[in-house]
Image (cartoon, rainbow, N blue to C red):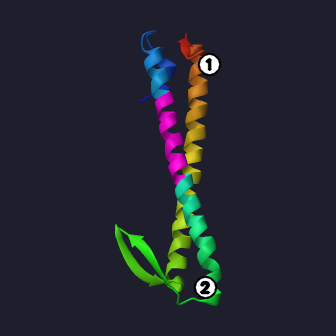
Amino acid sequence: MPPRASQQATQKPDPQDVPIIFQRYRTELQNLAQKIGEIESEMEEHALVLSTLRPLTKSDPERTCYRLIGGTLVKRNVLDVVPSLETNFSGIKEVLESLVKNYKNKEGEFEKWRNEMGVQVSNSFVRY
């Protein structure tokens, strides 16, 4: 984990620790970005399914569809599935917004730390 704000204010890390802390920040940011990508993909899948099923709620609400729940396909109808998909979609959207906010905060914290430590990145090398 990157150093805590209270640790940063009271003492500067050893020069040997700077690359380690830098790499921790980058790894955290990469992990958040990867998770954001996964959630975006899941959200797009939900949006696609919803765009397919919503018109059917009016024209053919009793049409059979299958939903994967815990690795098991469950037979349902469109009228039963759409509300739960909409709930899942809104939940995924909230999680995505939260992750993006966390990413931006962590990125700001990283930039602040880089400026305080005088860390510069050029050609994949870290200078401090």
Between 49 and 97, which is closer to the camera in this rendering?
49
Q: Residue at x 52, y 72 (%)?
A: 85
User: Dot 2 lies on which element?
Assistant: helix
Work out whether 56 lies above or below 37. Answer: below
Majority SS type along the magenta span: helix
Kindly report the distance in space between the C-alpha atoms of the residues bearing marks 1 and 2. Answer: 55 Å
Judge whether residue 31 is colored magenta: yes
Query: Residue beneath label 1, please?
Result: 115
Q: Amino acid at mark 1?
A: Asn
Residue 11 visible, this angle: no
Give residue 62's position: percent from left, percent from top.
53, 90
The magenta segment is 26-39
User: Dot 1 lies on which element?
Assistant: helix
- Ranked by sequence position, the earlier of labels 1 and 2 is 2
Q: Residue at x 51, y 67 (%)?
A: 88
- Classify mark 1: residues with Cα within 10 Å, few (<14), some (14-19) or many (20+): few
Q: Is residue 126 left or right of residue 58?
A: left
Give residue 35's position: percent from left, percent from top.
49, 46
Q: Is residue 72 left or right of residue 109?
A: left
Query: Residue beneath label 2, please?
Result: 57
- To which quarter of the image does residue 48 belong? bottom right
Q: Amino acid at mark 2?
A: Thr
Judge whether residue 43 is colored magenta: no
